[in-house]
């Protein structure tokens, strides 16, 4: 990490007009430094680090050779002071120095004996070929990084430190840094690198998952140039956005009439708003109906009203109160108080659908459900668990290949039962999917279609869901 930061400081001296510089040099430099920082921050052993380091530094080392050839024409006597060299020679030397230090930084993290001389020569070249004012600041910053490496948390201490401290030539250094950032910001193919360079400069970079994905871009794409790399980075960004966003699963019937699932991204605030909106409609309809004798003083009605008024920001309480309200209403219907009417059936259906949606799609609620399921698994006997596994297997008929295979895998995990967490997750996953299929079949039956299929997969789905729900609710039902 110290050498990466050193190379970034040297890069700041490459010249005012980056548009004159070959894109391959800029991309090669950034790739080399990214590789060096990833190696310093990663503990994975599943990467061929040495070969990747050599590949990442190749472009910058090649550029150094080009610079040496150019200098034969521009400034044959390299012993002259840098300040006295022709302007074009100064810029060329600065770029060659940056290229050399980038290559050295990426090789330095491996301490290969064959590379040590390369590293030493690169650092010496950098110190010899920088303007005096820049060199003074570079030495102080270099020493500060090494001091931080001796601290209790060396890596985090160095990463969080701005590239430059408050030295006397800050204005000159900042002016060149601003030139580089303006150049990178002006072209979409450098967008990621602009953000990365600026945040590394400020000591604020923290998206190492994203950086690791960029680091793993194939050599063929790197060889295709900055635009190809930028396109791949956009694809990675979209993939990570989807991966790190809350997911929802929707069940649907494919062209063969088999149930399958598809995933999407959910906005949690929109999810809660949707739940509360549909709940309010069904509740108001039931309370205001002349046929439904659900009293506002009924405990279930009070629980629903509490949810509507007070639980928007407490999703776990919201789900629990709705689950309790549903149980109370059903118990009352069984005792003929209140009377079952179309309005009350709609309210029950809304409670079923929305509590299922919350349990399966809201990550905070899903975590609580998984914990309750694990606890209940400790309390039930093996016969009950194996029965649930059997019900999972039964769901393979009437489901598409992927969904059917996942029901089968969940049944194997549940039947084994040795890993409580894995078993709880399998029951949670299959139970919620069965619940959604059950609701879909109920809706079809209510519309007067699909009665025969409802007698098949709908009943199997309800059997599995009811058994899983007893565990997910955390109490015997």
Image: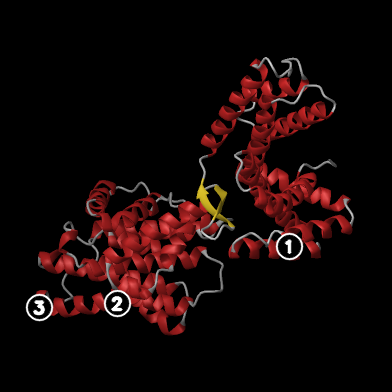
Instruction: Confirm or deny contact between disc 2 and disc 3 (CB under 8 A).
Output: no
Residue annotated with mark 3: 73
Q: Mark 1–mark 2 contact, CB under 8 Å?
A: no
- N-terminal of the pair, mark 1 or mark 2, is 2
Left or right: 268 in relation to 15:
right
State left or right for residue 20 relative to residue 48: left
| Left or right of residue 364, residue 192 in this image | left
Of the two numbered discs 2 and 3 on the same chain, state the one appearing first in sequence: 2
Label total for image = 3
Sequence-wise first label, 1 or 3? 3
Q: Quadrant of the N terminus?
A: bottom left
The foreground one among 309 and 364 is 309
Q: Nearer the viewer, mark 1 or mark 2?
A: 1
Q: Quadrant of the C terminus?
A: top right
Name the front one of labels 1 and 3: 1
Crowding near pointer 2: few (<14 within 10 Å), some, many (20+)?
Answer: many
Task: Name the secondary structure under disc 3.
Answer: helix
Residue in the image at 24% along x and 60% along y: 13
Q: Is residue 197 above or below residue 297?
A: below
Q: Nearer the viewer, residue 287 or 71?
A: 287
Q: Report x, y in % for residue 390.
A: 79, 61
Residue at image position (86%, 55%) is 384
Q: Residues within 10 Å of mark 3 (few under 14, many from 20)?
A: few
In front: label 2 or label 3: 2
Quarter of the image for residue 44 reads: bottom right
Element marked by disc 1:
helix
Q: Is residue 360 visible?
A: yes
Whether tag 1 and tag 3 are in contact, CB under 8 A, the answer is no
Residue 393: mark: 1
- Which residue is labeled 2 in the image? 61
Label 1 vs label 3: CA separation?
77 Å
Q: CA distance from mark 2 to mark 3?
A: 20 Å
């Amino acid at each position: 990490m110290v050498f990466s930061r050193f190379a970034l400081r040297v890069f700041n001296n490459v010249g005012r007009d980056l548009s004159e510089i070959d894109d391959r040099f800029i991309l090669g430099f950034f790739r080399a430094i990214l590789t060096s920082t990833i190696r310093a921050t990663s503990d994975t052993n599943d990467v061929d680090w040495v070969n990747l380091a050599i590949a990442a530094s190749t472009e910058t080392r090649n550029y150094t050779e080009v610079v040496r050839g150019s200098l034969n024409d521009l400034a044959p006597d390299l012993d002259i002071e840098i300040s006295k060299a022709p302007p074009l020679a100064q810029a060329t030397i600065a770029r060659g120095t940056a290229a050399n230090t980038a290559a050295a930084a990426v090789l330095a993290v491996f301490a290969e004996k064959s590379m040590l001389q390369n590293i030493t020569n690169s650092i010496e070249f950098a110190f010899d070929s920088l303007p005096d004012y820049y060199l003074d600041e570079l030495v102080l910053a270099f020493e500060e990084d090494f001091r931080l490496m001796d601290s209790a948390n060396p890596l985090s201490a160095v990463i969080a430190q701005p590239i430059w401290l408050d030295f006397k030539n800050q204005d000159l250094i900042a002016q060149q840094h601003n030139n580089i950032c303006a150049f990178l910001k002006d072209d979409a193919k450098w967008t990621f690198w602009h953000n990365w360079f600026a945040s590394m400069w400020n000591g604020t970079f923290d998206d190492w998952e994203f950086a690791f994905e960029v680091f793993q871009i194939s050599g063929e794409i790197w060889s295709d140039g900055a635009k190809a790399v930028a396109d791949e980075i956009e694809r990675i960004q979209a993939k990570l956005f989807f991966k790190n966003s809350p997911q929802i699963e929707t069940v649907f019937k494919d062209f063969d009439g088999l149930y399958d699932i598809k995933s999407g991204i959910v906005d949690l605030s929109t999810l809660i708003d949707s739940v509360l909106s549909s709940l309010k409609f069904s509740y108001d309809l039931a309370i205001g109906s002349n046929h439904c004798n659900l009293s506002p003083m009924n405990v279930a009605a009070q629980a629903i009203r509490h949810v509507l008024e007070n639980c928007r920001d407490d999703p776990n309480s919201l789900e629990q109160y709705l689950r309790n309200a549903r149980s109370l209403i059903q118990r009352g219907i069984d005792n003929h108080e209140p009377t079952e009417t179309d309005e009350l059936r709609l309210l029950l259906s809304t409670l079923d659908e929305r509590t299922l949606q919350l349990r399966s799609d809201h990550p905070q609620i899903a975590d609580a459900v998984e914990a309750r399921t694990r606890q209940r698994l400790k309390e039930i006997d093996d016969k009950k668990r194996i029965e649930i596994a059997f019900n999972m297997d039964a769901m393979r008929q009437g489901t598409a290949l992927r969904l059917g295979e996942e029901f089968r895998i969940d049944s194997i995990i549940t039947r084994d039962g040795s890993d409580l967490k894995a078993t709880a997750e399998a029951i949670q996953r299959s139970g919620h999917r069965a619940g959604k299929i059950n609701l879909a079949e109920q809706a079809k039956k209510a519309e007067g279609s699909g009665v025969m299929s409802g007698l098949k997969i709908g009943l199997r789905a309800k059997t599995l869901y009811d058994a899983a729900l007893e565990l997910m609710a955390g109490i015997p039902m």
